[in-house]
Image: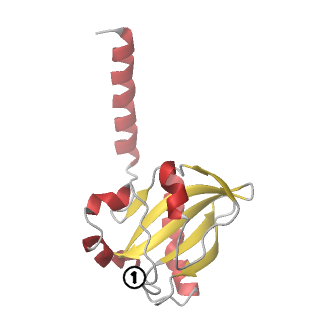
Amino acid sequence: MTMRAQFLITLLALLAWSTESNGESLPDHCAILPTSQGAALIRQCSRGSPAGVSGFWNPSLSQVLAVEQRLPELLRKSCHKLKLSDSYRQYVGVTSRGKKLIYLNSFPEFVLGHSGDRRDWRTTALIVCDGGDVFWGVEFDPADNTFHNIQFNGVA
């Protein structure tokens, strides 16, 4: 085995150990999408989404967990009756007007039965036109831990 191969195996083992040792992981209903899906995710047809986007980036696990921790308060303040346990959420980092934000796309579980393979939602942007307020999105500023521009889908 080459030194490079030994190094890579050691590095992978350390990464696996560090992930297990801190105990943090995304909730089952959440996914951080690849940056290649960012442009598709912000092309929502029934609601507003981040404007002035110049690029995409990968939010960290801890940044997404910070969003998740604050979501119940956001929904309470918005008078939204949706239970987070009933929704699935996709995350992507966006650079909007020079500011790094995290965009969240939320949708109900029932849509997965209509969109094919359940695993696709973890890697592919899910776009639903209309559908009502069970489909929504919001921008999160990780610099000051605040939400901005919550938007709900319309109804046809």
Q: Position of residue 27 (x, y in %)?
A: 37, 62
Considering every residue shown, the one lying at the far top of the view is 2
Q: Secondary structure at mark 1?
A: loop
Residue shown at the point (61%, 56%) measured from the top left: 94
Q: Position of residue 98 (x, y in %)?
A: 74, 54
Q: Position of residue 17 (x, y in %)?
A: 35, 36
Report the front residue among 87 and 133: 133
Q: Is residue 82 above or below residue 67?
A: below
Task: Please name the colour scheme applied to the rendered image.
Answer: secondary structure
Q: Is residue 133 left or right of residue 5?
A: right
In this view of the protein, which residue sits in the foreground, 65 or 123?
123
**Within 10 Å of the Cα at label 1, are there few (<14), some (14-19), or many (20+) other Cα atoms?**
few
86 to the left or right of 58: left
* 155, above or below 42, in the image: below
Q: Look at the picture and state if 83 lies above or below 103.
A: below
Quadrant the N terminus occupies: top left
- Where is residue 50, by image quadrant? bottom right
Residue at the location (61% across, 66% down)? 140
Residue at 40%, 52% in the rendered image: 24
Q: Three-letter amino acid code at disc 1?
A: Lys
Q: Nearer the viewer, residue 17 or 147?
A: 147
Counting labels gives 1
Circle 1 sits on which residue?
Answer: 83
Query: Is residue 128 shown above or below 50?
Result: below
Residue furthest to the right: 98
Q: Could you say where residue 13 lies in the image, as x and y percent from the top left?
A: 33, 30
